[in-house]
Amino acid sequence: MAAARLQLGLPAIAAGTTAALLGLVALPLAFVLLQAIYPELANGSFAAPLSHLRALFGDDALVELTLNTLRLGACVVLLSALIGIPLGALRGLFRLPFAALWDLLFLIPFMIPPYIAALGWIMTLQPNGYAQQLFGLNAAPFLFSFAGVVFVMTLNVFPVVYFAVSRTLASTGSRLADVGRVCGGGPWKCFFRITLPLALPGIAASLLLVFAMAIEEYGTPAALAANAGFFVLVTGIERRFSDWPIDLPGASTLSVVLVLLAMLAFWLQRRLLGKQVFETTTGKPNDTTLRALGAWQWPVTALFAGVALVATLTPLAAIIVTACSKTLSGGLALDNLSFAHFAAIFSSGETALRALTTSAALGLGTALVTGVLGLLVAYCVVKTSIRGRVLLDALSIMPNTLPGIVVAVGLILAWNQSFWPATPYNTWLILLLAYCCLLIPYPVRYATAALAQIGDNMEAAARVHGASMLKMLTRVLLPLMLPSLLASMLLVFAVASRELVASLLLAPTGIQTTSLFIWRQFEQGSVGQGMAMSVVTILMTTTIMVAVTSWQSRR
């Protein structure tokens, strides 16, 4: 009877999850694909299909854009792995001084919009920038180059790897490695043969996300490498949207190329992992006691401090100093410091407060929706044998391969049609749909990695004891997955709270987010006010995330 109740719940969950992904992801992507096939689709015509492809694929620039995109993604993945995996392993396995502080500092890059972080580095390393004023360092040739783009982008995304590795290893603990030590294995051998394999799903999932984030990021390459002649697919897409005449078919076709690149990475991930998935099957709670670092305590602390200084404190300090400067030309001088920009953004009526409230509400809503959907998608993919589960997994990662501007156009094409009896277009719901579509890969990847380490005996025990499908998910699997899933939801909240490109295209009249407020301040030449709003936004998101983390720790 219990097994029957469980099985009766599975088709409903699978059908509901599939329907949600089809509506959330497949529908706008389908319209992007249709636009790539039918160049006159925006005019309501299916005439001359694929007629634009000869000119597009005959352009040598397409090959250069594709190779540049692959090179950028590969370099960011490699550097993120070199930084994130060692730091994550140290955080997850050992008692680290000020551990909560490092977690907080490594979360802050997700709360800083990439274009704001890039601007902070420009203010620091440009000629007569803050670094030159303080130390005589002018690193503009490095910053405005391919290496500079990789450097800045890695500092923004390596926490994805850090949190995936640290949370995974913290949940598995060191008990199995200790057994290996008892059986004669050395510490390094036990780490590479026992501990690290248990984290492979999380590492692979996080690196796949890093690659997707690297190839879809627009602000950093546009701000730092355009003058050096380094262009990628996403900048090519943006130019086709912004330069007259607007080339919707060309932009949609380049977006399809981005999807293919992401699917190639997805296939390589599954190919490399193959059957190399390891899980614990005893059902006993793991010994998650953190080990002492001994003599390495302070060298490791210095390593974390150095990474935090470069990745977080330097760009954040540049943002704060700019927000507190009366004029940019005044430089680092006491008489140039002022809180006038902060006073100005709050003296403009309720505009700033409404923007903060809207962003917080949309961020929380996106985190909740994608968290629930991520759990269900991961369960269908990892713990069931339903047909099409691989396609379901692939569909869940597709949105992170598209620029926000392309997803926004897909939503416009999909929902701005006369045949719909009701539509979310021109309401706040269209922003929620856009954010959920863009960010669903985060909880899906993290939940998939967490589920891969939970043996099927847990589910079997729930069936034997008469648990329903809902109770099994919420009372058995969810508590075991909660650290990884909650970490992904915090990342979703941070990213959704400062999303810009989709908001620019989709925000209805009268609805303003913090990113739109900041962007419009920059458009008006008020860089100081834009930076001041960035500081307020960072404080808001940090407070919420610290509160959630503290609540989890108390539980």
Image (spheres, rainbow, N blue to C red):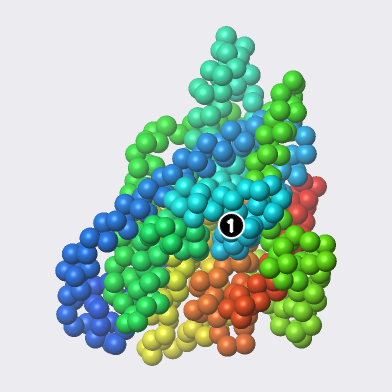
Looking at the picture, tell me which residue is in the foreground, 361 or 222: 222
Residue 436 shown left or right of residue 146 in the figure: right
Residue positioned 59% across, 51% down in the render:
138
Q: Is residue 385 left or right of residue 2?
A: left
Q: Quadrant of residue 412?
A: bottom left
The one nearer the camera, 430 or 281, is: 430
Q: Position of residue 317 (x, y in %)?
A: 72, 56
Is residue 10 at all visible to an observer of this figure?
no
Q: Residues within 10 Å of mark 1 (few under 14, many from 20)?
A: some
Residue 301 x, y percent position in the rendering:
73, 33
Left or right of 551? Residue 388 is left
Where disc 1 sits, the SS reads: loop
Residue type, mark 1 in image? Gln
Q: How many marks?
A: 1
Residue 70 lies, with reference to residue 523, above or below; the image says above
Q: Which image quadrant is residue 395 in?
A: bottom left
Q: Which residue is mark 1?
A: 126
